């Protein structure tokens, strides 16, 4: 995981990430990242992160898992189609 600590007045990317736990203490705003399965304390406002995942936004896998397959009267399939089987 790679991330960049920005300046104090920049928005904290961890506030909107599903992998983080955010809190305030006497020294200011803090975050703990749980992306790798272990608690990683973040010491400042993160401005860039390669593992950022917005809270409440479904992944493509989740979209495909919940999608419906609709059939028309002509027998054509509409919507997500299952992947073609290997030959």
Image (spheres, grey):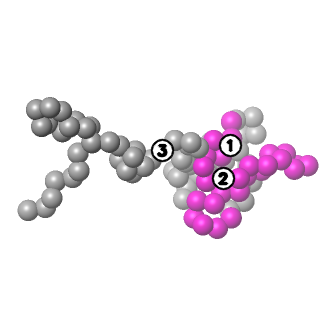
Q: Quadrant of the C terminus?
A: bottom left
The local crowd at label 3, few if under 14, some if 14 to 19, many if 20 or more residues have their Cα within 10 Å, is few
Q: What's the distance in space between the residues labelled 1 and 2, CA to CA?
A: 7 Å
Q: Residue furthest left?
A: 87
Q: What's the distance in space between the residues labelled 3 and 1, CA to CA?
A: 17 Å
Residue 13 percent location from the top left of the image: 64, 42
Q: Tell me the element at label 2.
A: strand
The local crowd at label 1, few if under 14, some if 14 to 19, many if 20 or more residues have their Cα within 10 Å, is some
Q: Are marks 1 and 2 in contact (CB under 8 Å)?
A: yes
The magenta segment is: 11-39
Mark nearer the N terminus (2 vs 3): 2
Residue 70 percent location from the top left of the image: 25, 38
Q: Residue at x 12, y 37 (%)?
A: 75
The residue under label 1 is 15
Q: In the image, which is nearer the foreground, mark 2 or mark 3?
A: 3
In front of the other: 69 or 32 = 69
Q: Is residue 80 left or right of residue 32?
A: left
Residue 66's label in the rendered image is: none
The residue under label 2 is 20
Mark nearer the N terminus (1 vs 2): 1
Residue 47 percent location from the top left of the image: 62, 42
**Residue 35 falls inside the magenta stretch:** yes
Mark nearer the N terminus (3 vs 1): 1
Q: Is residue 53 left or right of residue 82?
A: right
Q: Is residue 38 above or below residue 58?
A: below
């Amino acid at each position: 995981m790679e991330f960049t600590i920005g300046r104090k007045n920049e928005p904290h990317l961890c506030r909107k990430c599903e992998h983080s736990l955010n809190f305030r203490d006497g020294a200011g705003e803090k975050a703990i990242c749980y992306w790798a399965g272990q608690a990683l304390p973040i010491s400042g406002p993160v401005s860039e992160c390669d593992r950022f995942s917005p809270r409440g936004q479904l992944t493509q896998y989740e979209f495909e898992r919940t999608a419906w397959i609709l059939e028309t009267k002509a027998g054509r399939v509409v919507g997500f189609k299952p992947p073609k089987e290997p030959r």
